[in-house]
Image (tube, rainbow, N blue to C red):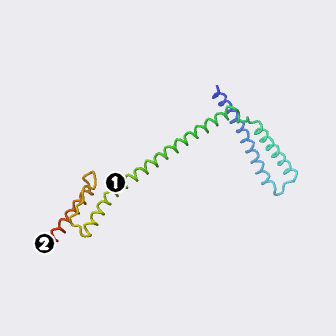
Amino acid sequence: QELAQRGVGTVILSMKLTTVDEELMRLSRLENQIRFRRDGTSSQMISDVRAKASEHVFRIFEVLGRLPAYQTEQTLAGLQMEQQRSAQLLNTVLLLTLIALVAYAVTVVCGFQWISAPLRTIAKGTSRIANGDTDHRLGSVSRWNDEFTDLAANCNRMADRFREAEDSLSA
């Protein structure tokens, strides 16, 4: 029933706006007549055309004044519901964004730890070997058999060669 009332209201509004549009077109025609008649026409004719134009403007305002007010209680209630729904949707989007940012931060921190911890272990071990402790060997630096494990094995091989070179020079 409410939709039917809205439909009837829309039809009435459309008809009134069509009337306003027609009056505006008549007013435009009168304005053109005034422009074309200025050259040599009597001031009485121009006054008549202006009076007709004023009459059309008055009719336009009259029609606009009769338009229904659309700020009824139902419309306001509908707008308030839409505002609440929009606010809830905005809160949901903000919450999801916050969750995504937290997940991103956790991923970055874990990724940084996953990369930096084995590198720190390798850096400390190679520093000890470089300072002359050729007996030092790097243990397992990563839980997986990855590039860090390969790097640690190569550092240990290098330390073995340093040790062999030292032994051959000492002998």
Count all numbered tags in the image, as a single digit. 2
Q: Which residue is rendered at x = 64% and y = 36% of the image?
A: 80
The reply to whether callout 1 and callout 2 are in contact (CB within 8 Å) is: no
Whole-percent x, y for residue 92 in the image: 52, 41
Q: Quadrant of the C terminus?
A: bottom left
Front-most of residues 48 and 13: 13
Q: Amino acid at mark 2?
A: Ser
Question: How far from the left and from the top, in percent, is residue 152?
Answer: 24, 60
Residue at 27% across, 56% down: 141
Name the kind of residue labelled 1 in the image: Trp
Looking at this view, name the residue that lies furthest to the top. 1
Using the image as rendered, state which of residue 4 and residue 163 is in the foreground.
163
Foreground pick, 159 / 60: 159
Kind of element beneath mark 2 = helix
Closest to the camera, between mark 1 and mark 2, is 2
Residue indicated by mark 2: 168
Left-right relation of 165 to 31: left
Tell me if residue 129 comes above or below residue 59 in the rendering: below
Q: Which residue is mark 1?
A: 114
Instruction: Pinpoint residue 155: horizontal percent, then vertical percent.
Output: 23, 63
Residue 9: which numbered mark, if any?
Answer: none
Q: Position of 167 compared to 81: left or right?
A: left
Say whether residue 125 is left or right of residue 90. left
> Which of the marked residues, 1 or 2, is nearer the chain's N terminus?
1
